[in-house]
Image (cartoon, rainbow, N blue to C red):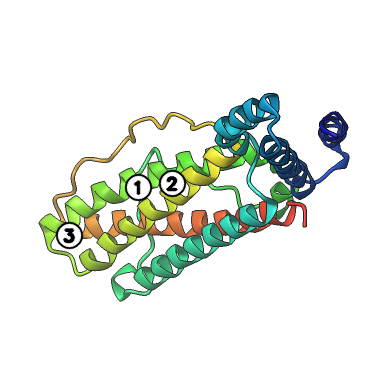
Amino acid sequence: MLFGRVETRSYYKSGTGSWDEHWCVVYSCIIDLLSSAVFGDSSSSLLLSLLLAQLHLLASAFPAHPRKIQTDFDKLTNQTRHLLKLTQDLLKDPVFGSEIDHHRFKSLPAISSRVSDLTSLESKPTLSQLHADLKSFEHHFEWLNRITRKQQHSSIPKLTGMISHIKSLINSLQRQMTRTEAPQIPVPSPSLPPNPTFHWDVVQSSQELLQQFRLFCDWASRVFLTLKSRLPA
């Protein structure tokens, strides 16, 4: 009976079985070994001990269930949309009503917002790039937070909260990358502007960073939805 089930496992590896069917085979083998062990088959007892000892390795070798991955992408989408809402709320401040006179940040991620780009996304490199971009924005916002604290700007509470949500999204994205074996891209140190000495420079720096991050969040939420739509049902 065990040899027949080994053939079933080979059948699964050929791509015709499902993860649930595969685990049913594994557990059936365990039950057969338990039955043999109860009736005094010493070789079955030894095989059972070895199988149980390695069961956690078997579990870690299999990818997450598609439904679990779908739930993970839902969480990533919701977190990103929440950050988008925080950014939009900050930009409603009347102080940001003027046009940016010149760009102060030279190392902000370049955001692609073309719908056509969504059709050609590859999961692993896309997740890696989003993670690197988020880390870059995190560094820029932490710099801005230090500056606004010195100037006692009114946006400090929301800016601090935003950084906390960015870190949470980064952690969620890192877990997803681990499950899908997506590599982490090294994030170079950002090229930050000199510390502004005038309040107007702080306002302009804040506005530029928030506008770029708004574009990023809008793009990232679309990316997560697209990657989720490609998962098997």
Residue receiving disc 1: 138
Question: Under tag 1, what secondary structure?
Answer: helix
Q: Is residue 230 visible?
A: yes
Question: Under tag 3, what secondary structure?
Answer: helix
Q: Nearer the viewer, mark 3 or mark 2?
A: 2
User: Residues at badges 1 and 3 in contact (C-beta under 8 Å)?
Assistant: no
User: Quarter holding the C terminus?
Assistant: bottom right
Q: Earlier in the sequence, mark 1 or mark 3?
A: 1
Which one is nearer the viewer's eye here, 232 or 151? 232
Question: Under tag 2, what secondary structure?
Answer: helix
The circle drawn on residue 168 is none
Quadrant hosting residue 191: top left
Quadrant hosting residue 100: bottom left
Relative to 83, residue 16 above or below = above
Residue receiving disc 2: 134
Give the residue displayed 22% in from the left and 54% down from the top: 145
Which one is nearer the viewer's eye here, 224 or 231? 231
Q: Amino acid at mark 3?
A: His
Q: Amino acid at mark 2?
A: Leu
Residue receiving disc 3: 199
Left/right of residue 138 with respect to residue 4 in the rendered view = left
Give the residue displayed 57% in from the left and 56% down from the top: 72
Report x, y in % for residue 207: 35, 60
Q: Earlier in the sequence, mark 3 or mark 2?
A: 2
Q: Is residue 104 visible?
A: no
Q: Nearer the viewer, mark 1 or mark 3?
A: 1
Quadrant hosting residue 168: bottom left
User: Residues at badges 2 and 1 in contact (C-beta under 8 Å)?
Assistant: yes
Relative to 127, residue 146 above or below = below
User: Residues at badges 3 and 2 in contact (C-beta under 8 Å)?
Assistant: no
